[in-house]
Amino acid sequence: AEGPQTVSFNIVIKAWSNSGDEKGADRAHKVFSLMEKLHEEGHEDIKPNVISLVTLMNAYAKEGDLEMVEKLLHTADVDGDLTNCYHCAISAYAKVGHANAGDRAEEILTKMKDPIEDTYKIVMQAHASANRPDAANRCEDFLGRAVEDYLKYKSDIRPQKSFFKVALDAWLDHHNQEEAAERASALVKDMIGLTKEWKMQTKPDEKIVDILIELWSRVNAEKGYEILGYFEKQDIIPWRNSYNTVIRAFNLKRNSGSIQKVLELLHRLESRGMAGTSNYNEVLFGLSKHPNVRARNRSLEILQVMEDTLQKGDKGKGPNSRTYATVLYTLSSHASGDDIAIAMDIFRRMVQLEKDPESRGIDRGGYTAILLFLSRIKHHESADTATDIFNRIPEPNGAHVSSAILANARSFTEMHALTAYNLLLKTSRLFLAGKLKDPPNPSAFCAVLRALSKVNNIHTDSVKRAYKILDLIKEMKFNALQHADIYILFFDTLARDTNNNSGIEAEKILHSIPNRNTALWNSVLKVWSSSWHVDKVFETQRFLREMQDANIKLDIVSYNAVLLAAATSAKMSPEIKEKTFKIALETLEELKHSENIQPDNFSYCNMIRCYRTLVQPSQERINSIQEMFEECKKKGEVGSICLEELHRALPPADFEKCTGINAGKTNLKKEMPNIPIDWKFNIIERGKHNQNRKRAGSSKKSEF
C-alpha cells in the first residue's frame, strides 16, 4: 500500500521535474533511487509507485532524453497498472518529433500487455509529428492497420472518431496540399462507410468537417464552398469557423464573383442565426479589398446590423475594434472628404470600447486604420485630427508614425508641412536611439520632402530642412536605388534653391550614392538646369556628357534638361547667348537622331523659347520659329505649353496664321480641344499609355 512517506517523496520528485533546472531530471532520479534503496532496507511505507515513475519519466522527456525514458520504463520495479507509463514513453516521442518517432512508438506498443484505445491514438500522434515528408501517410497507414485488425481479426481496439481526427490533423501539415485534401476526403468517406456498414462510432462531426473544409479551401475556394454546402444539407451543421475558412479563401481571390460568394455565405449564416462577430469581420475584410462605392456602402450596412444586434444585448454578434478598423480601411481605399464625418464617428464608437470592461479596447490596427484614412484626405482638418490621435497612442508603431506624417504633409499648408517635418525628425531620432520600435517608412520621407518643396513661404529654409532629412536617410541606411524617390525629391528641393552652387552640391551627393539609376542622374541635371549659376547651360551639357561616359541610358528628360537650361539663360552677353543657342540646336539635333527617343512637346516648347530669349528679333527668327512649330505639328506634339510659348514668341498676326487661334485669347489651355487631333496625336497616345501602365501596376479592381 502507498504510505504517507511515498507521497512525500513523489512531491519532491514532481518539484524537481517542474523546476526548470538543467539537472532537474537527474535530481529527481536521485530521489527515486533513494526510495528504492530505503524500500530494500526495510522501509515498507516507502516504495516507488506508478506516479513516481511517470513523474520521473516526464522529467527526462522534457529534457529530450528519450533513451532514459525507455530505460526507466523497462527496468523500474513498480507495482500497479503500467499503462500510463507506456503512454508517457510514447507521448515523449510524439512531442519530440524525431524522424523515427512513429517507429519507436510502435515498438513500445508491442511490449504492452493490454493496450487501450488511447494508446493507439498516441502512437498515431507520434507518427503524425515525425519530422519526415511521409508522416501523414504513415499515420494513416497505422490507422488502416488498426481498422483492419478490428474488422478482420476482432481486435479489442475499436477505432474511434478521434483516431480519424488525428490522421486528418496530420494531413493539415502535409507539404502537398492537393494530395492532403484528396486523402482527407477519402478518410471522411471511410468514416461514413464504417458508420453505415459496421455501426462504428466514426460518424463525422463538426470538427472533422472543419478540417476537411480547411484542407480543400487551401487548394480551391470553390471546392471548399461545395463541401460546405454538402454538409449543410446533412444533419451536420458546419461550425462558424468553417464558414470563415471558405470566406477567407474567397477573399484571397479579390474579384467580383468571389465577394458575391462571400456575401451569400454571410446570408446563409444569418438565416440560420449563426452569424457571429468573427464571420462579419471576415466579410468586412473581403469588402475592404474592393475599393469602390458598393463595397463601402455594404460595409456600412453590415456595421449597422452588428451595432443594432449589440443594442439588443447580443455581444456575440456586436462589433469589436477589428470591425471598426476594417470598415475604416474600406473608407480609406477611396478616401473622400465627404467621409470624414463618418470615419470620425466610427472612431468615436471605437473609443467607447475602452470604457467596456469586457472589451480589449482599441488595438493597434484601429489606430492604424483611422490614421491611414486621414492620411489620404488632403485637408488641414484631417491633419490636425491625425496629430491629436497620434499623440494619444501609448506605443506608436511605424505605420502610426508614417500615417500621421503623411496626413500633415499632404495638406500642403505651411503649418502642417512643418508639423510633418518636425514629427519625422522626432520619430526618426527616437528610432535611432532605440526608443521606437519602427522607423517612419520611405513614403513619409518622400511626403515631407514634397511638402517642403511645394508649400509657399518656406522655400528659404526648405533646403536646410531637406539636408537634415538627407542626413537621417544616411543614418537609417536606406538603400539608395531601392528608395531613389527620396533622393529625387531631395534634388527637386535643391533645384528651388537660389544658391548658385546647388548643381555642384547635387553632384557631390549623387556621387556619394553607391547605386545610381537614370532617374537620379536626371534629377541632378534638373538641378543644374534650374540653378542660377552663370554657366549653367555649359555645366548641364558637361553633366550630360558625363552621363554618356558613365554608360547611363539617356532619356527625353535628360535632353530636355539641357534645352531648359539654354531657354532660361537669357541674362548674358551676346557672345555667350550665341554659344548657348548653339548648344540648344546641337542638343535638339542629337535628340532627333537618337535611336529610341524623339523630341516631345517640352522639347519644342524650350526650343521656341530659346529662339525668343537668345536670338535677336528679326524676320529670320520668326521664320525659324514657324518652321519649328510646323515640325512640332507634324510630330503630333502640340500641347498647351507649346502654344503659350509660341504666343509669346510670335507677333499676333503670325501666331494666328500658324495656329488659327485668335491672338487675343489668354487661356490657351481651353483652346486645346479645338486644335486638330493630328497636331497632338503623340501627346494623347502617351496619356493613354501612362493610364494603362497605372492600371497594370495597381491591384485589380472588382466590378462589385
Image: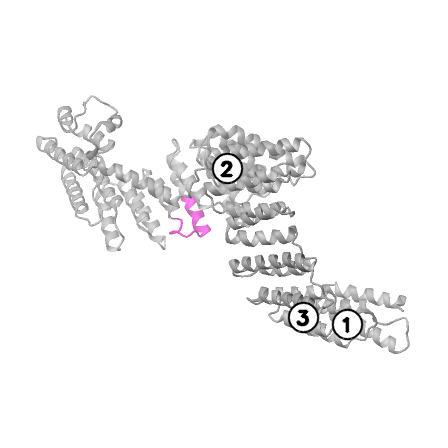
Few, some or many residues within 10 Å of mark 1 (<14, 14–19, 20+)? many
Q: Is 45 positioned to the left or the right of 444 in the image? A: right
Q: To which quarter of the image does residue 43 belong?
A: bottom right
Seen at 65% across and 54% down, the residue is 204
| Gap in angstroms between the C-alphas marked 1 and 2 | 61 Å
* Amino acid residing under circle 3: Ala
User: Where does the image place residue 67, in percent across and percent down from the top left?
Assistant: 69, 74
Compared to 675, does 39 lie above or below? below
Q: In the drawing, what numbered circle is on residue 105?
A: 3
Nearer the observer, disc 1 or disc 2? 2
Nearer the observer, disc 1 or disc 3? 3
> Do the numbered discs 1 and 3 sit on residues whose CB atoms are within 8 Å?
no
Q: To which quarter of the image does residue 64 belong?
A: bottom right
Which residue is label 2 attached to?
330
Residue 22 visible to the viewer: no
Q: Of residues 27 and 189, which is closer to you in this image?
A: 189
Compared to 256, does 165 lie above or below? below
Q: Is 630 positioned to the left or the right of 175 in the image? A: left
Q: Of residues 157 and 266, which is closer to you in this image?
A: 157
Q: What residue range appears in magenta?
A: 467-483
| Gap in angstroms between the C-alphas marked 1 and 3 | 23 Å
Q: In the drawing, what numbered circle is on residue 304?
A: none
User: Where does the image place residue 417, in percent across and percent down from the top left?
Assistant: 44, 35
Compared to 161, does 243 lie above or below? above
Q: Is 11 positioned to the left or the right of 666 in the image? A: right
* Amino acid residing under circle 1: His
Q: In the drawing, what numbered circle is on residue 29?
A: 1
Q: Earlier in the sequence, mark 3 or mark 2?
A: 3
Residue 469 located within the stretch drawn in magenta? yes
